Amino acid sequence: MLNTNSFTEWYSASHEASYVRTRKSPGGLLDLVDLARPAGDMSHPALAELVLYQDQVGGGQVSANAGGGFFSVKSEQGNFFLAAPNFAQTVMVDRSHHVRSLSFSLTQWQTMLDEAAGGQFSVESLRLYRGAFHSPVIRSALQNLWFLGEEEGVPSRLLVRAAGCEILAELCRLGGAPLETVTGGLAPLIRRRCLEAMRARMSEDLSLDELAADAGLSVFHFARMFKQSLGVPPRVYLTQLRMQRATELLQKTELTITQIAQEVGYSSNQVLARIFLKHFHRSPTEYRRIIRNTRT
């Protein structure tokens, strides 16, 4: 009988619960779990989720059937493994290991998965279920998604949905889906309207779904066309907009850091400070002081 619980719910409620180090559910759209566990059986029942694992240490022999047939490989640090939805995965690892997992609920992502897989290509038949693989694109997107959860606590739905689209597109491309090549970006009018909405509503939890609907496109295709037009994914562009607006407010107003954080869409001054420091290598307070000192 199919177990419809999520991967994170199953892990947290099963005998594996003591191995969970960190759980994140950024935007309520994705589930991230950090696991440190001993050698042995890490199988799980059939779940209505696509689950991506990344080996954080490497060195272990992984013997498994994740939905594409039995395989046995020596895992390297950074290797990815993909488990098919609705399949009872069997996995044995011969030494202690540290993994991070990202699970896509079919309830939340099925439509997008269908679009990414070309409509006539089953997600269950992706070649990636057959063993370990590398992907710089997914590694970067997953790392950024993990940091989003740490930096922002509850990041916006736009940031999380866009990151999920990036990862799904690359999984489908690597897995043999007939992914349509993006040859053009957003039409000029749609592009302008989209950017105006992002600027005007950056303090709100604006979703990628809303922007896509306004453009008359599916979320998956909108995200890809946005990147084609702007050179960066929507999640990166939104952060750039927020940082640009924060610097303007620091320079031109007497608003407090907390007020500025709220103005640009962050939940607290601490969140703004963390992201500002990452981009400008100084705190908002230091930035304001330096800018004002140069004018005197």
Image (spheres, grey):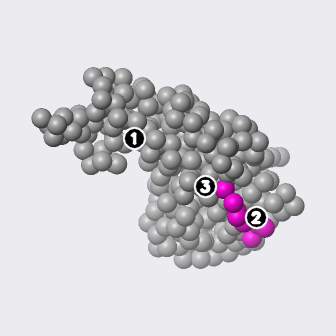
Disc 3 secondary structure class:
helix
243 shown above or below 269: below
> Which callout, 3 or 1, points to the residue nearer the camera?
3
Classify residue 279 as left or right of residue 202.
left
Classify residue 260 as left or right of residue 169.
left
Q: Residue at x 49, y 73 (%)?
A: 76
Disc 1 secondary structure class:
helix
Q: CA distance from mark 2 to mark 1?
A: 33 Å
Q: Overall secondary structure of the magenta stretch?
A: loop
* Residue extending farthest left: 296
- Contact, mark 2 vs mark 3 (Cβ under 8 Å): no
Q: CA distance from mark 2 to mark 3?
A: 16 Å
Image coords of residue 146 (percent x, y): 48, 49
Q: Read off the magenta span.
A: 176-185
The amino acid marked with disc number 3 is: Ser
Q: Which residue is denoted by mark 3 in the rendering?
A: 229
Q: Is residue 206 magenta?
A: no
Q: Is residue 18 at least partly visible in the picture?
A: no
Residue 160, by quadrant, is: top right
Q: Which tag, 2 or 3, sits closer to the chain's start?
A: 2
Q: Which residue is denoted by mark 2 in the rendering?
A: 180
Q: Residue at x 68, y 43 (%)?
A: 190
Disc 2 secondary structure class:
loop
Image coords of residue 213 (percent x, y): 73, 38
55 shown above or below 223: below
Q: CA distance from mark 3 to mark 1?
A: 20 Å
Q: Is residue 238 at least partly visible in the picture?
A: yes
Q: Which residue is denoted by mark 1 in the rendering?
A: 243
